């Protein structure tokens, strides 16, 4: 069944992928963070614990999130399109690349440790988004 | 040998007699009655396994540790019964506030969990037929050469303090072992990166060497930690991110990502360690700040050295993006210092003067 | 404070001018003309990946590294261009290859990198409950785990003590030592966890053992300390791990010992190959090593500690009844004879067979009536 991006269903489908492709996430190691993805007006909160995505929800604010990745909807679509086309984000569309300078995608957090969790668990978070290539996604 | 036993045990009839008693089945068995605090700890989260936090309960946990260790200088594990006659192994780091960070056990667990091996996990073949032009490739190899140096000396720094640390702080010792391992892996990965294909190493940077020496010869462990974990690895982490962000092949994306990941654990420990240290001993802030002032001076030398900034110019696509990279990284580093309880270091720091130089302001 | 470098960059006109030049596009580019060798490096075995052995060519390799790599004393990686008169001297104390090198150290390091395991998740901790043990068995096992937790970190502290003194030209050795540090931290961790998961907790530390650990840590040179630690002490521990796997009260414990023994074997192999390197390249060090092992064996003999030996007997015999003790004594006796036999075998393989006649273990075993068994086994 197709899922629309962006939507809560999209992130719930990715959550399921962390169970369906559990070995891949286990190989990457522990991932313990709750973070946000702000797409337009919506803030999606995504929680990881140990190896798995434990929950996704719409959040009213970022108060209990380690960090938030913010970008215009067009950029998010561009990233997902790259993932779908290449079976994983290409170098120009990885989370790190897009957020590196801070002018396209912004990494926002209220403390240094929260900020750094993005980097500590980067490979797992990238894998989370890259799993979209297993889904049927309408952009 | 420095330590000479008080007896020649091979010629000691008591030992032989003891052994003969045992082999004849005459066991003492009184040790069976000397049992400490019972423990039957289990994983609090089965999927995570049995972590250090799971077993750090009751008398076995670090909460009960006094600030100054006076009761044990042997290798007896924390919580074990301590009989008379335990020798001192000469540990010199015996204050909890000198080493402790609550996040350390978690970081050790994470380091083990997020392991990788450069030999097989880096997709080296992606470098074949890479689209880099020759100059950019030379620039990457030069940066890799510097990262090897950073890995080698960071391993030395962790080792030089680990062996002097009291066994009661075993979580920190474990974490330092993980740091030694991570640092050695950085050196390995970037040596392989520099040499793979038609490879070569670049030049040794004297300025980088002076920075590393300043950190290596820090007088105290808190100073070494602030300089290495908080300061140096803020830059190493940023370089990892920059490496991945400017990569044009899967191997460099992987290398940069892993470098950033591993380096962030150093930074996270550094922030928490300095914060805990200053929370317990606020008067140490001046000493730490002073040490960082001096190390930041050496950092400026390293960042401004041709063998660092020029390759970054090539990799970043020009002077302005390289300068912007420096500015962003400095900003993150200053924010971490603030979070660690060192206050706003921006104005006083020589790093700020350096950034102004890059902007063309020679004030 | 110790060292802060040779330049003050706060008001440094040279630096300011240089930044201005770079901004204008006038780069120095000296680093591009490093003059270092450009060689072809590739993965010889795709399954193994890109290893140190693949990089072992030309000025980057370790085979051609001389006994005395004159010049580099800083952070310069082997093969990088450096100026001996313009480097930050890190003042390494171990600058001879024979001080630290071992045959096959590169492959030991690669093996260590690929065989890392995790005490937290690779041991099925929750399964302990499935295997009931008597109190006396769990107490004996807790004492054994207390011993292992106590001793394992010496094999981190000792290598760490020497690692930072080694010249960075010997990077494969330094890397191996870093892997050993991580291995031993993991061993100390797993035995602590096991002691604290079984219902009894930690038991008593062992003074005689501690004196051995102190003797290792206080070794005068790296090679002397390595001979005592890697060859003798870790060799003994390796035999104990094999024995402990055999007498483990539960499959969970067997798994622990299967995992730790693979690491320990690697450390012992390094020690043996380091000793062999010395025998082949610096045989004049023999007497020094003899004296170190004289004292090492001496303190090892004193490790005959009631608690340690008896807990192994109780575990091997599966209890404290006289018949169980008798069985336990037989099994432990065989293990202890094996410790010596295997130590002697390693000395032979390292080219140090002359040590056997001089060993303090030989007359002692004769006193105990098990010398013939050891002799026959050799």
Image: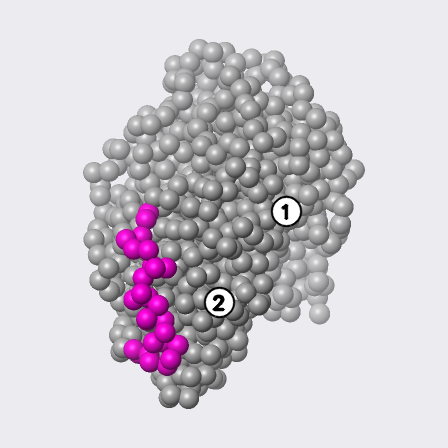
On the question of residue C58 being in view, the answer is: yes
Residue located at (38% from left, 80% from top): B24
**Do callouts 2 and 1 mark residues in contact (Cβ within 8 Å)?**
no
Chain bearing mark 1: C
Q: How many marks?
A: 2
Pointer 2 indicates a residue of which chain?
C
Q: Residue at x 46, y 74 (%)?
A: C332
Q: Secondary structure at mark 1?
A: loop
Q: Nearer the viewer, residue B335 or A74?
A: B335
Q: Is residue C74 above or below residue C200?
A: above
The magenta segment is: B3-29
Seen in the picture, residue C214 relative to A23 is either above or below; the reply is above
Q: Nearer the viewer, residue B21 or C27?
A: B21
Q: Quadrant of residue B141?
A: top right
B230 or C133, which lies in front? Answer: C133
In the image, C213: left or right of A40? left
Q: Are marks 2 and 1 on the same chain?
A: yes
C169 lies left or right of C237: right
In the drawing, what numbered circle is on residue C104?
1
In the image, residue C230 lies at what x, y percent? 49, 53
Residue B349 in view of the camera: no
User: With B199 as the anchor, is B358 left or right in this view?
Assistant: left
Which of labels 2 and 1 is toward the front? 2
Q: Which residue is mark 2?
A: C371
């Amino acid at each position: 069944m197709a899922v629309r991006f962006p939507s809560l269903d999209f992130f719930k489908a990715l959550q399921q992928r962390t169970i369906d492709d559990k070995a891949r996430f286990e190989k990457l190691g522990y991932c313990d963070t709750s973070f946000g993805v702000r797409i337009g007006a919506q803030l999606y909160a995504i929680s990881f614990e140990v190896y798995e995505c434990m929950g996704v929800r719409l959040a009213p604010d970022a108060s209990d999130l380690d960090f938030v990745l913010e970008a215009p909807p067009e950029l998010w679509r561009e990233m997902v399109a790259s993932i779908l086309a290449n079976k994983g984000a290409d170098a120009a569309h990885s989370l790190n690349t897009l957020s590196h300078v801070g002018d396209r995608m912004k990494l926002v957090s209220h403390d240094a440790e929260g900020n750094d969790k993005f980097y500590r668990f980067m490979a797992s978070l990238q894998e989370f988004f890259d799993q979209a290539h297993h889904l049927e996604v309408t952009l | 040998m420095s330590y000479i036993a008080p007896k020649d045990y091979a010629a000691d009839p008591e030992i032989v007699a003891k052994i003969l008693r045992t082999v004849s089945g005459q066991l003492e068995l009184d040790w069976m009655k000397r049992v400490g605090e019972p423990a039957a700890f289990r994983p609090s989260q089965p999927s995570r396994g049995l972590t250090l936090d799971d077993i750090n309960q009751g008398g076995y946990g670090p909460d009960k540790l006094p600030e100054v260790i006076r009761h044990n200088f042997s290798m007896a594990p924390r919580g074990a019964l301590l009989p008379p006659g335990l020798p001192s192994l000469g540990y010199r780091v015996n204050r909890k506030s000198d080493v402790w960070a609550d996040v350390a056990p978690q970081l050790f667990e994470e380091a083990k969990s997020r392991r990788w091996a450069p030999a097989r996990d880096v997709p080296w073949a992606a470098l074949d037929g890479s689209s880099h032009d020759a100059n950019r490739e030379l620039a990457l190899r030069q940066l890799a050469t510097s990262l090897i140096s950073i890995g080698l000396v960071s391993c030395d720094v962790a080792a030089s303090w680990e062996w002097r640390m009291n066994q009661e702080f075993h979580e920190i010792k474990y974490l330092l072992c993980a740091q030694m391992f991570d640092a050695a892996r950085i050196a390995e990965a970037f040596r392989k990166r520099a040499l793979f294909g038609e490879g070569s190493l670049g030049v040794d940077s004297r300025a980088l060497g002076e920075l590393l020496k300043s950190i290596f010869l820090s007088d105290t462990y808190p100073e070494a930690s602030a300089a290495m974990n908080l300061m140096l690895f803020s830059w190493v982490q940023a370089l990892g991110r920059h490496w991945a962000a400017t990569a044009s092949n899967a191997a460099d994306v992987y290398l940069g990502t892993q470098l950033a990941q591993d380096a962030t654990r150093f930074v996270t420990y550094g922030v928490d360690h300095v914060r805990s240290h200053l929370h317990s001993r606020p008067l140490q802030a001046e000493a730490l700040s002073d040490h960082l002032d001096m190390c930041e001076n050496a950092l400026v030398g390293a960042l401004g050295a041709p063998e660092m900034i020029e390759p970054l110019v090539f990799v970043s696509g020009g002077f302005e993006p390289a300068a912007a990279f420096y500015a962003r990284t400095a900003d993150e580093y200053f924010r971490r210092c603030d979070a660690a309880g060192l206050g706003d270091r921006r104005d006083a720091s020589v790093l700020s003067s350096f950034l102004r130089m890059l902007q063309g302001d020679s004030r | 404070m110790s060292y802060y470098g040779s330049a003050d960059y706060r008001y440094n006109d040279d630096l300011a001018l240089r930044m201005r030049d770079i901004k204008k596009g006038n780069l120095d580019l000296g680093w591009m003309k490093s003059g270092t060798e450009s060689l072809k490096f590739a993965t010889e075995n795709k399954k193994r990946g890109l290893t140190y052995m693949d990089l072992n060519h030309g000025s980057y390799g370790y085979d051609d590294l001389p006994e005395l790599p004159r010049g580099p004393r800083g952070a310069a990686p082997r093969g990088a261009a450096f100026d001996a008169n313009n480097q930050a001297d890190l003042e390494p104390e171990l600058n001879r290859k024979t001080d630290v090198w071992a045959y096959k150290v590169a492959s030991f390091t690669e093996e260590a990198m690929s065989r890392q395991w995790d005490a937290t998740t690779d041991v099925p901790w929750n399964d302990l409950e499935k295997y009931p043990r008597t109190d006396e068995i769990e107490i004996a096992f807790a004492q054994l785990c207390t011993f292992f937790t106590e001793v394992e970190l010496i094999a981190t502290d000792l290598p760490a003590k020497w690692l930072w003194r080694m010249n960075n030209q010997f990077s494969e050795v330094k890397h191996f030592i870093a892997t050993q540090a991580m291995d031993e931290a993991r061993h100390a961790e797993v035995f602590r966890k096991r002691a604290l998961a079984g219902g009894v907790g930690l038991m008593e530390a062992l003074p005689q053992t501690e004196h051995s650990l102190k003797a290792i840590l206080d070794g005068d040179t790296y090679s002397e300390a390595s001979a005592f630690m890697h060859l003798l002490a870790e060799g003994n521990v390796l035999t104990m791990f094999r024995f402990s796997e055999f007498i483990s009260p539960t499959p969970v414990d067997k798994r622990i010992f299967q995992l730790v023994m693979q690491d320990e074997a690697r450390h012992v192999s390094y020690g043996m190959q380091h000793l062999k390197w010395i025998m082949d390249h610096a045989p004049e060090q023999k007497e020094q090593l003899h004296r170190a092992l004289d004292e090492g064996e001496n303190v090892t003999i004193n490790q005959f500690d009631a608690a340690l030996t008896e807990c192994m007997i109780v575990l091997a015999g599966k209890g404290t009844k006289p018949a169980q003790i008798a069985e336990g004594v037989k099994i432990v006796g065989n293990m202890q004879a094996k410790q010596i036999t295997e130590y002697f075998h390693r000395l032979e393989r390292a080219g140090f067979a002359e040590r056997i006649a001089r060993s303090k273990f030989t007359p002692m075993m004769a006193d105990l009536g098990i010398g013939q068994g050891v002799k026959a086994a050799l």
